[in-house]
Image (spheres, rainbow, N blue to C red):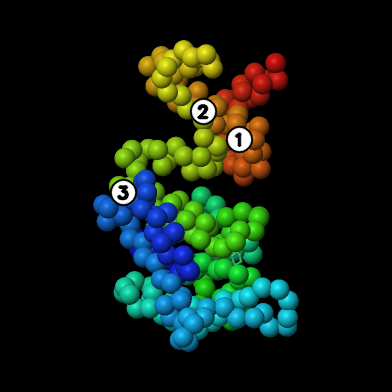
Amino acid sequence: MRIDVVTLFPDFMRQCAAVGVVGRAQQRELLQVETWNPRDYATDNYRTVDGRTCGGGPGMVMLIEPLRSALKAVREAAPDPVHVIYLSPQGARLTQGRVEALAKLPRIALLCGRYEGVDERLLAHEVDEELSIGDYVLSGGELGAAVIIDAVGRLQDGALNDAQSAEQDSFSNGLLDCPHYAKPVHDALGDVPDVLLSGDHAAIRRWRLKQSLGRTWLRRPDLLAQRALDKESRALLDEFRREHAQ
Ligand SMILES: Nc1nonc1C(=O)NCC1CCCCC1
């Protein structure tokens, strides 16, 4: 998969994509991340990329031309069609389901706004989808782009050493993740639950599912409401609720 990022801070974006699982995915050529700086496509001597807000008011707006030229270069850089995403609080909230769909595309481009935003005409003609990583305002779209690169990059086949860990992530099955423990088995902070030391993989699976269901019930009941539960899950959640009520 190829991800092209249009950003005034290319070094920052390249560093975000160079570490950990995503960096390894790039080394394994499972993922390609390229950056494009609109300032390189500005036509004046000052390499201007912003302009005063029409109608008055504070702040500046990113100009159409440098962004349109940068996106033209993005489209021409490789044969596959590009799905262009603009990061902003006005976008649809990013979900794991949307991440999984994006991870299947051959190419996406991430347009990172700065200042007060991007000229609406550019968004209307060049952007396919507007996405938000949450209901808060950042100083630019780069952190949202970094979130998408990470969430999509780690899902590329071969990126994770143990494919299961993608399936068992929080939200991948619509539930929050279960608790995790490592050695030592006994610590001043407490002990590892006995079931995890039992070697009984069926019991461990049930315990983990019960903990995921219980956590989701306690912390994100909205997610639970969206999810049909099979007979086993209903029984495990009832068990968790009874124990929690005691
Ligand atoms: N929230 C968000 N989710 O994705 N991006 C977000 C953001 O707050 N972005 C900053 C704005 C700042 C003005 C220009 C456009 C981007």
- N-term-proximal mark, 1 vs 3: 3
Who is closer to the viewer here, 37 or 230?
37
Does 202 appear above or below 100? Answer: above
- N-term-proximal mark, 2 vs 1: 2
Does 53 appear above or below 202? Answer: below
Who is closer to the viewer here, 203 or 129?
129
Three-letter amino acid code of the residue under disc 3: Arg
Q: Quadrant of residue 5?
A: bottom left
Q: Quadrant of residue 117?
A: bottom right
- The nearer-to-camera label among 2 and 1 is 2
Disc 1 to disc 3, C-alpha distance: 32 Å
**Residue 43: mark:** none
Q: State which quarter of the image contains the C terminus.
A: top right
- N-term-proximal mark, 3 vs 2: 3
- The nearer-to-camera label among 1 and 3 is 3
Disc 3 to disc 2, C-alpha distance: 26 Å
**Residue 24: mark:** 3
